[in-house]
Image: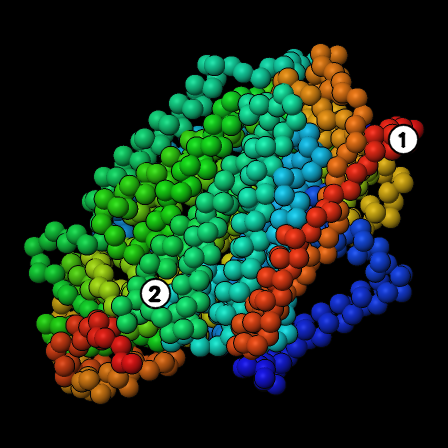
Amino acid sequence: MLGRLTFEAFLHEPSQNFAVLMMTLSGLAILGWITYLRKWKYLWDEWFTSVDPKRIGIMYIVVALLMFMKGFADALMMRLQQAFASGDVSGILSAGHFQEVFSAHGTTMIFFVGMGVVFGLMNLIVPLQIGARDVAFPFLNTVGFWLFAGAANLTVISLAIGHFSTAGWLAYAPLSGLEYNPGEGVDYWIWMVQIAGVGSTLSGINFLVTILKMRCPGMTFMKMPIFVWSALCSMVLVVFAFPILTATLVMLTMDRYLGMHFFTAGGGGNPMLYINLIWAWGHPEVYILILPAFGIFSEVVPTFSEKRLFGYTSMVWALILIAFLSFIVWLHHFFTMGASPLVNAFFAVMTMLIAIPTGVKIFNWLFTKFRGRVHFTSPMLWFFAFVLNFSVGGMTGILLSSPPVDFQVHNSLFLIAHFHGMVIGGLLFGFFAGFTYWFPKFTGFFLDEQLNRYAFWCWLTGFLLAFMPLYMLGFMGATRRLDHYEAATGWQPLFVIVAIGAVLILIGALIQFFGLFWSIRNRKKLWAGSDPWNGRTLEWAIPSPPPIYNFAIVPTVDQLDPLWAMKRGQLNLFNQPYEDIHLPKNTPIGLMIGFLSMTFGFAMTWHIYWLALLSFLAIIACIVIRCSGKDEHAIIPAAEVKKMEAAYKS
Amino acid sequence: MKMAQKPLGFMLISTAIIFLLFLVMQPLEVLHYRESLAVLFPKGLIGIEQRNLLLIIQALMLIVIIPVYILTFIFSWRYSAHHTDATYDPDLVDNKLAEFVWWGVPLVMTLIIGTLTWVKTYELDPYKPIASDKKPLTIQVVALQWKWLFIYPEEQVASLNFLQFPENTPLHFVITSDAPMNSFWIPDLGGQIYAMPQMKTELNLIANTTGDFRGSSANLSGEGFAGMHFIARSSSEEAYQKWIASAQAGYTLDAPTYTELAKPSQDNPVTLYHLGESSLFDQIIMKYMHPVKL
């Protein structure tokens, strides 16, 4: 009846039991609080069933921030373990638990935090920047989000029931095969990544088509805001790369469930094929995450320099080049596999080529400041830290891309320092900049600036303390993923510094969470109005928070930075009369599909086949019901729109 | 802008101080840890060549990075909104010459680093034998769960979690795994190569001095992975011969002993064997080639 699910699955080490208990209690407290406030109907009507990309964007970011707490707790546990576990001391975690923790850390941070903030900001900003009232496929959008949320929930469930994968965040075969990992951990990993991955593909298709087809009149490709360009390149990568992930996981699933031999050692399988395939997706994936961050900085820097972006055409071509090159460099993740020098040298040079467009972007940002009026608000502080850290990360990236050097630093902590420099220094700092910048747009009020600054200083120093010593540790031969090391290595002092850095980052993150609540409490005082930063792009031309239909009148543009043009009297954006607005109706089917997918994943993980079959059939039924529905749109009459706009203006 | 402005100088100076501290700290760290910085102060020819390449690329990169750092600080100061006397040109969006410069400079740097890398990738190909007047010593490496087995096919000995070799002698490692993928790495001597089940990889290294070097697995291979470190001892020819003799007097490693040894275990003590099954290494690889029993 319950497949392989037994009572043992609920038994864990004391530290984990405590975490599960706290998590359950706080979950119950939140549910109780919502019930006490009688907000369930509001949440259901306004949020859970919403197809409004603005609402979905906020939900993406909420899930991503919750998952960030979990991923960060994992990171802290790892760093504390490594600060102590030297010589005779075995530390707080067992080897198996430690391996679960780092596997969960990577999976959570990439799939649920990274992808979550990227899709969150795109949902919030892309339709506004292209002058659209909605996305191309609003239903697909909710399905994408709820698959993401369902998969995230599965990660949390795996904490309480059974064990997570111990095979690392990419689950290299054959370690992730049945022979070496017979437990439920890898299955949990497979299903949560598979579900989140399918969600990403759907969202990717949605945004690709939205950007291609839904731009307002007059917005040709070379008049799109640069953030939209970065989103476009990123979504092209999603659409091309994620199917590779899906296929690879299907093959791994067949190995594990049906005894096939795609990636097994022996039986004709080839584990190295898995490593090739997973990186054929994995390398584009890191650019899926970083390109939108580039886009954010390309919006933030001009706005706070009171200037237009320097070298727009260069920036666009740089994005396209990076997106293209990201597909032909995957082998640099395993130069050490023993390929011939010709193969290694080719991929090395392809990788180095990426430095050219990236360098161009850095110079263009710097020269956007040139002859501007630079305001050092917190988004600019994040940009400042980004340039300084990203340059170091880029330099070490070039070192890693040279095979003879890579042989000496591959899989060492040097590599860890490099990619955290890129992901934290690039994506996360970029998200913080974008979040602070656009926060007044989708809420109507500012984030508290002073608290943001305190958080910034904690993050910057914490980041440097937590990751600079890792370069040194890598040079000492310290490899990644060690739950324990000999005292004779002399690594411990550096690991202690690293742990201190992690604690400092924790303080920064806590200040940010506090700042978020503080700003919401004091929102009256922090009220921002529709265009607080003297914006250049369309999102600042409408009220904050935007009305459900975004644009009462669809704007017409004929140049870049249309809002600036309007402010200078060169352009009349809203020259059309009011009209009836068609908007999609809310639907609970996205949420249902997400929930059922989670059930399906859980059932498959524990081999509860009747439940898996039931969930699968229910998903099909949901799709059939949705497809046979006729009345999917609501109409807001022109007169009503006029009234609402007048209310906003007063 | 509605946001309150903080003194800009304070911000720039504190950032500069933080980064300078780290810049000063790194060389001090290097100095302090020079004994254990295997990658920067290696004890073998290959490692030294790789280190040199690392330093050259690093120096070339700094030619670009340092101006970026300086420009970041200068522009932040000069064009801050406080300085109302600075030129303000909001529509300065393009400059052909400037753009040529920063497409051109990274292109040239990349071409230089790329060419260098191309040449060095061939030169330092791990499969390439090291030129020497001494006969290379072949050592077969098998990654197990969770220990390393070193087989000396010509000397007909084997050793667990320890290997010894004479200094200044080319070492020809032939590597496989009877476990999930590992990576065979002795940073003091030079770069790593994966140890993969059903595959054979090669690695050529040499030790310029005598000494005990730490080696380890650099790729996650399961629960006991962190304990997969060993000592690689470079010694004089006599000491090496003595060690070989002691190994020949050790336990016998035949097929049943190996099967027992290959079972998962952690923290195994150093053990020396006399090789009872001379084709053991090939058998380990072939094990995965047999058809699966249905």
Q: Is A614 on the left-hand or right-hand side of A45? A: left
The residue nearer to you, when weighing A555 against A166, is A555
Q: Is residue A155 in view?
A: no
Quadrant of the drawing holding the C terminus of chain B: bottom left
> Residue A151 appears at what percent x and percent y?
60, 61
Q: Is B286 on the left-hand or right-hand side of A64? A: left
- Chain assignment, label 2: A
Question: What type is the residue that disc 2 sits on?
Answer: Phe
* Residue at x-position 85% and y-position 38%: A526
Q: Nearer the viewer, mark 2 or mark 1?
A: 1
Position of residue B261 relative to residue A134, above or below, is below
Same subunit: marks 2 and 1: yes
Of the numbered discs 2 and 1, the one sitting upstream in the chain is 2
Q: Rate crowding at label 2 as few (under 14), some (14 to 19) or many (20 or more) other CA atoms within 10 Å.
A: many
Q: Secondary structure at mark 2?
A: loop
Question: What type is the residue that disc 1 sits on?
Answer: Lys
> Residue B31 appears at what percent x and percent y?
42, 50
Quadrant of the drawing holding the N terminus of chain B: top right
Q: Is residue A567 in view?
A: yes
